[in-house]
Image: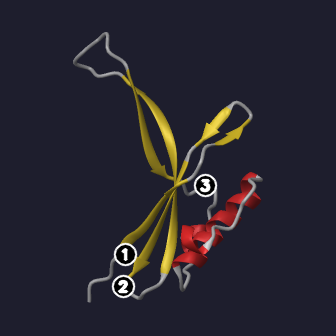
Amino acid sequence: MLKYSEVVETIIVEPVFLDSNELNFKIEILKNSAEMFKVRLFRLELYRVKPSFIKEMVADEAQYVLDTHTLPDIETVQHCSEERCLNEVLNSGEIFLNLPYKKPSENQL
């Protein structure tokens, strides 16, 4: 039997300011074929790209990359509901990044 996961929700988190840096995160909640949920955290990275075919051109590009360093344990835990999954990653972010966290209301989930 084919095992799969589908993205059931994507959340863009408001920017986090640490010192002079701005951190931007995206959270994806996935549901697997066994009806369990897990989360992936992405961080927005900026790249300066210089194409080889146009010497004077330089472009700044932004790309979300999988972030396995900020909250290293979140991908290994499975939850029985989408809400518990989201609460886990937001609570972990509050502890790690010292962010104020407000639990989303029922109609925000």
Tags 3 and 1 touching, CB below 8 Å: no
Across and down, in percent, residue 12 comes to 51, 53
Residue that mark 1 sits on: 5
Q: Secondary structure at mark 1?
A: strand
What quarter of the picture does the C terminus occupy? bottom right
Residue that mark 2 sits on: 33
Is 4 placed left or right of 62 in the picture? left
The Cα atoms of the two marked residues, 3 and 1, are separated by 22 Å
Amino acid, disc 3 = His
Is 89 placed left or right of 4 in the picture? right
Please identify, in this view, whether the residue under mark 3 or under mark 2 is nearer the observer. Answer: 2
Vertical arrangement, residue 90 with respect to residue 46, above or below? below
Residue that mark 3 sits on: 69
The Cα atoms of the two marked residues, 2 and 1, are separated by 6 Å
Q: Secondary structure at mark 2?
A: loop
Report crowding for label 3: few under 14, some 14 to 19, many 20 or more residues within 10 A (C-alpha): few
Amino acid, disc 1 = Ser
Please identify, in this view, whether the residue under mark 3 or under mark 1 is nearer the observer. Answer: 1
Tags 2 and 1 touching, CB below 8 Å: yes
